[in-house]
Amino acid sequence: MRYHEDLQEHAMAVAETNLTKPPELVSRERREIRKLGTLVEIGRILADTNALSLALERVLESLGRHHGMVRSFVMLLDRESGILRVEATYGLNLDQARRATYKVGEGVIGRVVQSGKPVVVPQTSQEPLLLNRLRSIEENPSRKEMSFICVPILVENKAIGVIGADRPYKQHRDFDRTTKFLSVISSMIAQALKVEQRFEADKKRLLDENTLLKQELRERYDFSRIIGNSNPMRQVYEQVTQVARTNTTVLLRGESGTGKEMIAHALHYNSLRAAKPFVKVSCAALPDTLIESELFGYEKGAFTGAQARKKGRFELADCGTLFLDEIGDLDLTTQIKLLRVIQEREFERLGGTETIKINVRLIVATNKDLEDAISKGLFREDLYYRLNVFTIFMPALRERKPDILLLAEHFVDKFEREHGKHIKRISTPAIDMLTTYHWPGNVRELENVIERAVLVCESNVIHGHHLPPSLQTAEGSDTVTRLSLTSAMEAYERDLIQDALKTARGNRAKAAKLLDSTERIIGYKVKKYGINCSRFRT
Ligand SMILES: Nc1ncnc2c1ncn2[C@@H]1O[C@H](COP(=O)(O)OP(=O)(O)O)[C@@H](O)[C@H]1O
Ligand SMILES: [Mg+2]
């Protein structure tokens, strides 16, 4: 604006000193200077903006105020649909104008985009091609004759939109100059659009990536990824469904590896906070001296080495969920601080005085016997009551035998994909071993056992001997007595023969070939182990 006025003043001064010049020349000079002023102003508007359509409106307004363009608009091409839409207007009702659209090639505006060349309509009343979709009668009540100028907005020689403007009709008007003037403005707009589009494309790509990642996370912790339909697990699902969408604190209890963390994720991703952060802190992994600063953050200079302010996990989880794993390992001092945060929903950073309000949903987990810890004075009873609002007990794997096979198959699928293997099935003896074992490490242990089996499996069937030694002997299992070497070998041999027969559809000669043996030996072993070959004939 300032520029504009300065330039206008300058123009006056020039005009005064040019009194000797013919008046026509003087007024033309004045107009040129005014145009220059407008260009400077427009450059400034476009450079300063981060909302392009608002900036475009200001550009059009400037054309209206200083250059008699009583009505004007910018239309942009929607690349996907090939339709031109109004982006900004001056002297026209924006909402109404937004409803008007043009196709490339349609009417005067459509032709400007198609050809990439400006069009001038000296008298709008005389031009049948002018579709006048943008103008309603109210906007030109006196029905004065108008001239219409339309220039393309070009990016890399392609029209991506137009500027259109009406000026009152005047005989012998020099449209060439006006067209050039508008073309300069259109190239400035094109530049701004290019910058914005690049920016928008980046933003869109980042947003897309983010959505994808979130989607992936959500899928990973989608209920359907939680395996098990045994009764104890059904009870867990029911509880998760009950509590997920509330803000209630949830306490997850159960042995290590039973899926507490997985359920914590499921609770978050099925809650109203799903789009907000899920932040985990493992209380056992951090020394007592660090846990506080980790949870609550600290101010610069709070202790030696605190060189800058750091946000704690409580702050990072704002509006989301904070998962405190192994809460039973929290030291007593931190327990007191945690209790205060839960009660008052606010805290201060270490070394800070500012009170920070929090909106965090708390999920905690432990494999410890908290009641026992209370009786030993290791866990505060008041904190326990604050946490023990809604408790979900995760069943041990040995208490839900029907799920073992489902989980084993789920992990076979997972790891065969991960390791690029092709595994058809788990042999019956191997399944027996999996189901009789007592799984002290629960699902985590099963997951590890299956990964190892997939890795060492040299065929497409997982056999007993692919499982680790803890499952091979009676030690690992409660039920089977210790096997002698001979009987273990025999069991293995029987496995192999049965599998070969299955592949050979009960044909002993083929099975013998598969095992690099002779039909006679196989026949002998089949009798010895009492294998029924007809079972495999299909
Ligand atoms: N029901 C289940 N379905 C599928 N995977 C499971 C299930 N329960 C546990 N897991 C897997 O077992 C591993 C251990 O689970 P985790 O949640 O970390 O146990 P915890 O926190 O109780 O020690 C994880 O890799 C988890 O994905
Ligand atoms: Mg865990």
Image (cartoon, grey):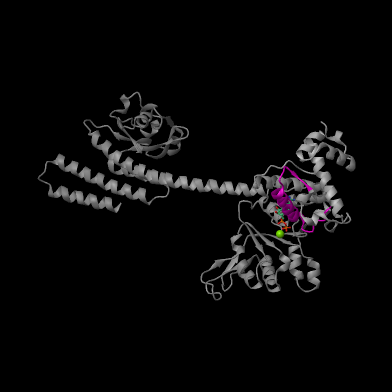
Q: Is residue 293 left or right of residue 250?
A: left
The image quarter containing residue 22 is top left
In this rendering, the answer to whether 288 lies above or below 363 is: below
Closer to us: 239 or 508: 508
Q: Is residue 73 magenta?
A: no
Ligand 2 - quadrant of the structure image = bottom right
In this rendering, the answer to whether 195 lies above or below 132 is: below
Closer to us: 276 or 62: 276
Q: Residue at the location (55% across, 49% down)?
A: 210
Note whether residue 48 is visible.
yes
Q: Position of residue 108 (x, y in %)?
A: 35, 28
Q: Residue at the location (33% across, 40% down)?
A: 186
Note whether residue 504 is visible.
no
Picture quarter with the C terminus = top right
Q: Is residue 262 left or right of residue 529?
A: left
Q: State which region is magenta.
A: 436-463
Q: Is residue 443 left or right of residue 6?
A: right
